Image (cartoon, rainbow, N blue to C red):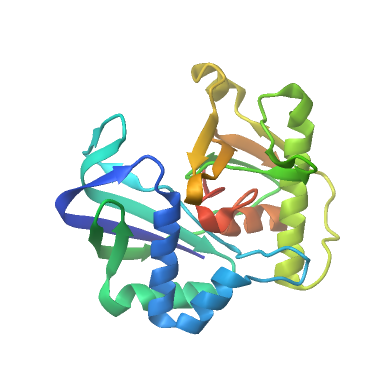
Amino acid sequence: MRLKLYLESETGIFIPYNYQYQLQSAIYAIISKSSLEYSSILHDKGFDNTGKQLKLFTFSRLLMNNCKKTRSGFMDVKEMELYFSTEVEESFKHVVLGIFSDQVLELNFRQRNRINIVHVETAKEPDFSKEMKFSCLSPITVSKTGESGKHYFDYMIPEEREEFVEAIRNNLQRKYQQIHGEEFSGDTVFEFSFDAGYIVRKQGRISKLIIFKDGLKIKAMESPFEIKADKELIKIGYNCGFGELNSAGFGMVKEV
């Protein structure tokens, strides 16, 4: 289930390059307008019957029109688009009800910005198959935690590429178990690869370093990709996000 929001600010606002945390907070605020209790549970606990806290929703980066880029961010932003997606009907319902309670999204940076939600539409799901191509609406991140802390896999490092793909697969299967209440037992074929032509055009620079809350640095990859897998896993990735930290604005995709 996916929504597309059209946003407008009455005056041009400033948005820094690292805005994921503020945007995440704005989305939880929208949900809380429908149900403060549900928003708090989703934020604090998520869905947790697999031993992992999964929120099972994701959102895109802000798609901005006619703004100026500076060293520190985007200036004079007035028009934006934002996608929100989830596999959970309850989350979808509370986002919709929260949006239409006052049709405002608040983004707080240097100052409080009340942005009007001028139009909302549902996005049609693609016809899912076992082989599909997607592009990123927000970057994809996966990691492992060891004695030295959390390490984010870099697809462009050959020694980490296989672990990157395996982490994507394992994450999708955990989401499947969370949604369906049983372990995944479908097609075991799983292939994932970023677009080689795009990598060439970008001269190998497909990694992003996102600064999140309290200076947390998150490495993520952004490139079109091909995936071959059970179509139920692909559907979950489309609706809930590929990889980790989806509720923080990572792993949202669109079909190409």
Residue in the picture at 64% in, 36% down: 226
Tell me if residue 247 can be seen: yes
- Up-down relation of residue 211 to residue 126 (above or below): above
Q: Position of residue 209 (x, y in %)?
A: 52, 35
Q: Find residue 91 and report its horizontal and vertical position in percent.
A: 52, 73
Residue at 71% over, 61% down: 175
Q: Is residue 156 above or below residue 2?
A: above
Q: Position of residue 130 (x, y in %)?
A: 71, 47
Frontmost residue, 84 versus 74: 74
Which residue is nearer to you in this view: 203 or 256? 203
Work out whether residue 122 can be spotted. no
- Left or right: where 74 falls relative to 128: left
Give the number of callouts.
0
Give the percent coordinates (x, y) of residue 159.
78, 25
The part of the image, by quadrant, that contains residue 66 is top left
Q: Which residue is pictured at 56% across the width and 22% down the height?
A: 199
Residue 170 shown left or right of residue 21 in the figure: right
Which residue is at a point 33% across and 42% down the rendered structure image? Answer: 16
Front residue of 225 and 162: 162
| Quarter where residue 56 is shown | bottom right
**In front: 189, or 37?**
37
